[in-house]
């Protein structure tokens, strides 16, 4: 049981490049979330999903897109990377509306 | 606008000291308050609080919620260097979203 896994662990992008951050969970959780964490700050919700085929915006969705074609996977897409998107990205999941969210190890992204 | 505010933002203590971390919130449709510990990687769950006045305890850590005054505290007694971490407070609403505070960075010196 791997829990929540994320790839890659680190990535450096140039301004304007695009990439997809992968997130997979094997706990059969319906809810999945993407957060970003800037230095000295708490986590801010980017997007979340309540099940396959259903996604919704969080606090800071601009510049990102998501899809949820399966229960297990919830990729986060950056289309035109900007320096403001330099951050650590965490994926999390939870079972239905249970409040305990289980977090992946994070992806550290730098945009230069 | 929903918000969660933690204080202090950072704290340096010596081993054996007792610390109290604070979390206040203004969240519509409050469901629960959660504490997480974040070391180098992902946050790990500590406590979930839903009822006022009931202390949750795990070893040297304890936490309590006051829903009337809209705050929670996290206490750590007899601190150890392994307690050094960022402690995150988050509040969930009935929509299932979590709103996080900025975190308190705790450093415990030997």
Image: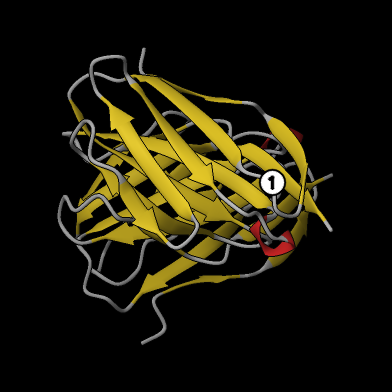
Q: Secondary structure at mark 1?
A: loop
| Relative depth, front residue between B57 and B45 | B57
- Residue drawn at point x = 84 percent, y = 44 percent: A112
Q: Quadrant of the C terminus of chain B?
A: bottom right
In screen coordinates, is A90 left or right of A11? left
How is this picture coloured?
A: secondary structure
Residue A66 drawn at (x, y percent): 39, 50
Asked if residue B73 shows in the view, the reply is: yes
In screen coordinates, is A25 left or right of A46? left
Residue A7 drawn at (x, y percent): 57, 71
| Relative depth, front residue between A105 and B17 | B17
Q: Chain of mark 1?
A: B
Asked if residue A63 shows in the view, the reply is: no
Above or below B48: residue A51: below
- Residue drawn at point x = 27 percent, y = 76 percent: A27
Dividing the picture into quadrants, the one containing residue B4 is top left
Q: Which residue is mark 1?
A: B17
Number of marks in picture: 1
Residue A91 drawn at (x, y percent): 46, 57
Dividing the picture into quadrants, the one containing residue B97 is top left
Dividing the picture into quadrants, the one containing residue B27 is top left
- Residue drawn at point x = 40 percent, y = 37 percent: B90
In screen coordinates, is B53 left or right of A82? left
In screen coordinates, is B91 left or right of B85? left
The residue carrying pointer 1 sits among few (fewer than 14), some (14 to 19) or many (20 or more) residues within 10 Å by Cα, namely few
Residue B1 drawn at (x, y percent): 36, 12
| Relative depth, front residue between A64 and A8 | A8
| Relative depth, front residue between A108 and A20 | A108
Above or below B42: residue A42: above
- Residue drawn at point x = 65 percent, y = 57 percent: B83
């Amino acid at each position: 049981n791997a829990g929540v896994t994320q790839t890659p662990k680190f990535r450096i992008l140039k301004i304007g490049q695009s990439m997809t951050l992968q997130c997979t969970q094997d706990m059969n959780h319906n809810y999945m979330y993407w957060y970003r964490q800037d230095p000295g700050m708490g986590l801010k919700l980017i997007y979340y999903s309540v099940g396959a085929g259903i996604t919704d915006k969080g606090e800071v969705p601009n510049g990102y897109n998501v899809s949820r074609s399966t229960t297990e996977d919830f990729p986060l897409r950056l289309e035109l990377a900007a320096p403001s998107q330099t951050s650590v990205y965490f994926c999390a999941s939870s079972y239905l509306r249970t409040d305990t969210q289980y977090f992946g190890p994070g992806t550290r992204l730098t945009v230069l | 606008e929903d918000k969660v505010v933690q204080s202090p933002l950072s704290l340096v203590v010596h081993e054996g000291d007792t610390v109290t971390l604070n979390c206040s919130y203004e969240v519509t449709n409050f469901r629960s308050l959660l504490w997480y510990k974040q070391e180098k990687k992902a946050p790990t769950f500590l406590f979930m609080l839903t009822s006022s006045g009931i202390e949750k305890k795990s070893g040297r850590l304890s936490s309590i919620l006051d829903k009337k005054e809209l705050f929670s505290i996290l206490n750590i007694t007899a601190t150890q260097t392994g307690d050094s971490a960022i402690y995150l407070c988050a509040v969930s609403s009935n929509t299932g979203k979590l709103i996080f505070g900025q975190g308190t960075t705790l450093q415990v010196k030997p």
